[in-house]
Image: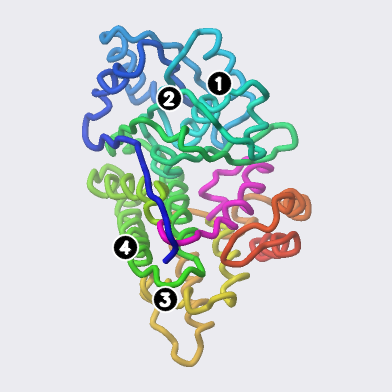
Amino acid sequence: MNNFQFHNTTKIIFGKGTELQIAEEIKPFTNRVLLHYGGGSIKKTGLYDSICTSLTKAGIDFIELPGAMPNPRLGLVREGIALCKKEHIDFILAVGGGSVIDSAKAIAAGFYYEGDVWELFSGIEIKKALPLGCILTIPAAGSESSPHSVVTNEKGWYKRAIHSSFLAPKFAILNPELTFSLPAFQTACGVSDIMAHLMERYFTKVQKVDLTDRLIEATLKSVIRNALIVKDNPDDYDARAEIMWAGTIAHNDLLETGRVGDWGSHDVEHELSAMYDVAHGAGLSVIFPAWMKYVYNEHIAKFVQFFNRVFGVEIDIDSDERTVLEGIKRLENFFREMGLPVTLKELGVTDDRKGEMADKAAEAAPLGNFKKLFRDDIYAIYQIADI
């Protein structure tokens, strides 16, 4: 196990009706808020009216910035920064899923930066940011308690990330009831994203990390079990609650303590969702099994352990490879059962821009840690995903 520091400052407020506490959570920080959200879903569910009523009764002024999209756009981030400066905003409330929260984080990061916010996505240190909080409506990205943000630049369709402790939300309100109305495909994409965050952390070459191995395995098994329950019964509160909490745990860095995660699959997928604007979780259900097929011989014992413990694959004493390939097949079958694609064709990607995606991804090469990925490796993974 490696040395580590773990520090997570986000206050989690979990359970039924917790969105009604929004004004009392914001009040200690500000009386002037940017309310940032996506499309019309929060208005259809009544969440928007509930938030507006709570803020107004508490005497909290708010300016709205709707329009956050899946794979959030840099253009709206720039618009949000300008709006916050013009309106003297000193707190951001993000209401939605990871895309809305990531967009809010980028606005928060760019507010105090004198240059263009995109420069921060090239590795410039974030020294200050507006405080923000969130109400989560889509369990997936784990952005509600992480210090990460991913944004897509429409110029060239680059999808890049920033990381800073200043970007961790001050609080996150998680009410599983707010996820009842999610379409089945969106729920499935969220499950895929959560699983990817767990698997990125699991596949490490750091030895003697049994505790976090076991925690990741248990979280994955819980996600898989409850995802199948929600698939048949979308209003099952307990199953929704398990998935929602798992999504937070999967990406608050607790399960990466003492180990080094991989993250190559995420970087490879980012080019796919940036170029084709596919749902991130659907892209990951395609890329992660392809990555596994390409890298498992790098440390096959880790894959044998994973598929035995998480998917119950009986270990073939004569062939580790057969054990792993059976496990990958079971993972793909689970994704298919959830209505997710496992090939580029199933994803609806039919034109061949794999070389272009590999070139763009390789600009930050080497990617990953379990196996270092260079341009030819990245292209090979896209090729496997096309079969």
Q: Nearer the viewer, mark 2 or mark 3?
A: 2
Label whose residue precedes the other's in the sequence (1 or 4): 1
Q: Mark 1 points at which residue?
A: 111
Dominant secondary structure (helix, strand or loop) of the stretch shown in magenta: helix
Task: Label 3, secondary structure: give it.
Answer: helix
Q: Give the range drawn in magenta.
A: 257-284
The disc label shown at residue 65, or none = none
3D distance between C-alphas at marks 2 and 4: 33 Å
Residue 78 appears in the figure: yes
Q: Name the residue under label 4.
A: 218
Q: Mark 3 points at which residue?
A: 305
> Which three-letter amino acid code belongs to the residue tagged 2?
Pro
Label whose residue precedes the other's in the sequence (2 or 4): 2
- Name the spot of residue 97 as percent of width and height, x first: 44, 35
> Which three-letter amino acid code belongs to the residue tagged 4?
Ala
3D distance between C-alphas at marks 1 and 4: 40 Å
Q: In which quarter of the image is the N terminus?
A: bottom left
Task: Label 1, secondary structure: give it.
Answer: helix
Q: Which of marks 1 and 4 is in front?
A: 1
- Name the spot of residue 186 as percent of width and height, x first: 45, 43
Check disc 4: other Cα within 10 Å, few if <14, some if 14-19, many if 20+: few
Q: Which of marks 1 and 3 is in front?
A: 1
**Residues at discs 3 and 4 in contact (Cβ within 8 Å):** no
Q: Mark 2 points at which residue?
A: 131
Taking depth in this image into account, of 219 and 5 the one nearest to the observer is 5
Q: Is residue 103 magenta?
A: no
> Which three-letter amino acid code belongs to the residue tagged 1?
Phe
Which residue shows up at 35% across the image and 54% down it?
A: 227
The answer to which quarter of the image holds residue 141 is top left
